[in-house]
Image (cartoon, rainbow, N blue to C red):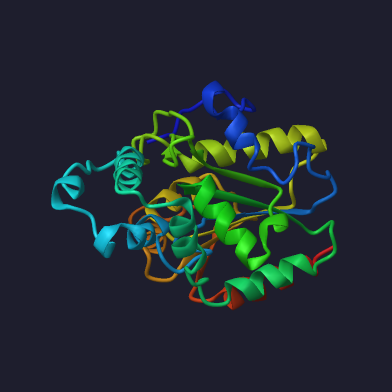
Amino acid sequence: MNCFGSPPGEDVTPPRSRRSANNMAANSATPPSDRRFLIIFDFDETIVNESSDDVVVQAAPGQNLPAWLKDTYRPGHYNEYMQRVLAYMAEKGVPESAIRSVIEKIPASPGMLALFQFLRHRPPQDFEVVLVSDANTFFIESWLRRVGARQLFVKIFTNPATFDKDGRLVLRPFHSHSCLRCPENMCKQVILRDYVMRRTQERGRPFQRVFYVGDGANDFCPSLILGPRDTAFARRDYPMHRLITEIHEARPGEFKAVTVPWASGDDVVERLRKHAEEK
């Protein structure tokens, strides 16, 4: 089963979303071409220790959603569901400040801030750091700025979300694709593949290694295109880890990347430090 999206190298953000998505880059300029390694992070339950979509409900009246709204969820259409959740919250008068407050209070996953410190203090030619998430721009920007980590990321790929004139947080899908594994609004494999191809063309050479840090089933899909020199950091006992274990058992040799289960960002630092010492 393969993922099919936009042609290689093409911006996967639709025209109506491109401006919002481009605002998620640290700047509009092409990142430096001397970085040896690419490291990609998921956000929910990877960088932060909870799902931001679940946490935002704490800002709703009674910190709960009505049953009729919960019943509108359909598998594979979570982005549409969250559009309705945010619209409901706006109708109930939940202000931007309340949403920002609950998001900013989400705890980081164990060792994650130490991992950020490690990356921040490495020589600038070591790591190009990217974030790929099915959360949204407002949640991610709010949290990263609160912990002072926004400038670590040269690019963030996520669903555009901005407040309109009526105070409603309007959420849109990132792109469309034909991958049967992933929710209709985002296939991270398509995003990773296109980004790596574009950066290889811009740099004139590939990255020495690619590292992917994630936890969920939608992080398993991009890990399938990693090569034998790359590393899939799968959060221990979470869906990504279980799916990788299953494919190793069912079809040995098909999954190419080195798999490193992590319980703390310290586990990731330990492996990255070893590779950073390579010449």
Q: Which residue is drawn at 51% across and 40% down?
A: 162
Q: Is residue 204 above or below residue 257?
A: above
Q: Viewer-proximal residue, 231 or 85?
A: 85
Q: In this view, does 137 lie above or below 124?
A: above
Residue 246 appears in view: no
Q: Viewer-proximal residue, 151 or 11?
A: 151
Find residue 67 and report its horizontal and vertical position in percent: 14, 52
- Name the image quarter holding residue 203: top right
User: Is residue 148 toward the left or the right of residue 125 in the image?
Assistant: left
Residue 218 appears in view: yes
Find residue 256 and report its horizontal and vertical position in percent: 53, 52
Q: Residue at x 66, y 40 (%)?
A: 196
User: Is residue 186 toward the left or the right of residue 24 in the image?
Assistant: left
Q: Residue at x 53, y 44 (%)?
A: 225
Quadrant holding the N terminus: top left
Find residue 174 and report its horizontal and vertical position in percent: 48, 35
Q: Which residue is drawn at 64% across and 38% down?
A: 195
Q: Is residue 98 above or below residue 147?
A: above
Q: Viewer-proximal residue, 166 or 4?
A: 166
- Name the image quarter holding residue 149: bottom right
- Number of numbered discs overlaid on the protein picture: 0
Quadrant holding the C terminus: bottom right
Find residue 179 and report its horizontal and vertical position in percent: 39, 34
